[in-house]
Amino acid sequence: MHIRRYLIAGLLVWLPIGVTLFVLNLVINLMDRTLLLLPPAYRPDQVFGIHIPGLGIVLSVIVLLLTGMLVANIFGKWLVSFSERLLNKIPLVRSIYSASKNFTEVLFTNTSQSFKKVLLIEYPRKGVYSLCFQTSAELAEIQARTDENVICAFVPTTPNPTSGFILMVPRCDTIELDMDIESALKMIVSLGVVVPRWVRRQHAIDPAAKEPVA
């Protein structure tokens, strides 16, 4: 029994370290492939005579910065728009590009499509609760046709939160949680093992929040 306990304790120490090193090695090797964009004579392996891991990360950061500077001006915006129109004309590429672009915008931009709040709703049935994210509350047509003050909620799947369900939920049927978006995502990815510590916040009470939209 002691040997089994010691083995498990050792695994709990080394397994996360091994996985972390494996992922880092995978990312560094993948980023190093960006060095292939350089002409052969200017690649670090040729210049220095040895392979230096991680230089691809530096090159990738430089490429991202230059790309960001390019698309920030009028010509860059026109170039991106032209490229998107071109990609949208290719059937299979259009679907992949559109889905990845929309998800990237959700994660990295602060627009009306971004995750706003962490909510708890009774889904998929009464008495069973699911974590979800409020994505939008500007649902004029849906609110008018349902005569309800509904919000758009994204219910992610676990352990892959990039897929899930879009639900139109009456605001009165939602419970706003104190946990932030990052903590909720960690809980989802970890299959509910990593539960964030509760830091209670005071919420302003909106008496009209549960009023149906006329």
Image: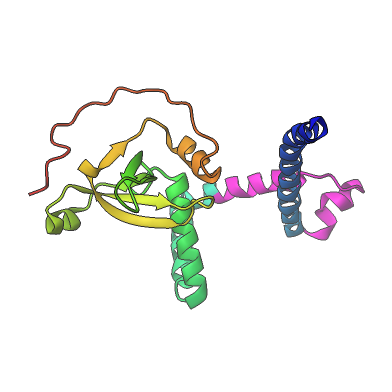
Q: Main secondary structure of the magenta part?
A: helix
Q: Quadrant of residue 9?
A: top right
Q: Is residue 113 left or right of residue 18?
A: left
User: Looking at the image, how many numbered discs can be counted on the residues?
Assistant: 0
Residue 56 in the magenta stretch? The answer is yes
Q: Residue furthest front?
A: 1
Residues in magenta, as a range: 39-67
Q: Residue at x 72, y 43 (%)?
A: 19
Q: Is residue 126 shown to the viewer in this render? A: yes
Q: Residue at x 58, y 45 (%)?
A: 65
Color theme of the render: rainbow
What percent of the width, then of the height, locates residue 172?
Answer: 20, 41
Q: Residue at x 45, y 76 (%)?
A: 89
Pick the residue in front: 6 or 100. 6
Residue 186 in the magenta stretch? The answer is no
Q: Residue at x 11, y 47 (%)?
A: 213
Q: Residue furthest left?
A: 214
Q: Quadrant of residue 132?
A: top left
What percent of the width, then of the height, locates residue 51?
Answer: 87, 48
Pick the residue in front: 196 or 144. 196
Q: Which quadrant, please, contains the N terminus?
A: top right
Q: Is residue 33 left or right of residue 134?
A: right
What percent of the width, then of the height, locates residue 166?
Answer: 34, 56
Q: Is residue 87 shown to the viewer in this render? A: no
What percent of the width, then of the height, locates residue 134?
Answer: 33, 45
Seen in the picture, residue 14 relative to 124 is either above or below; the reply is: above
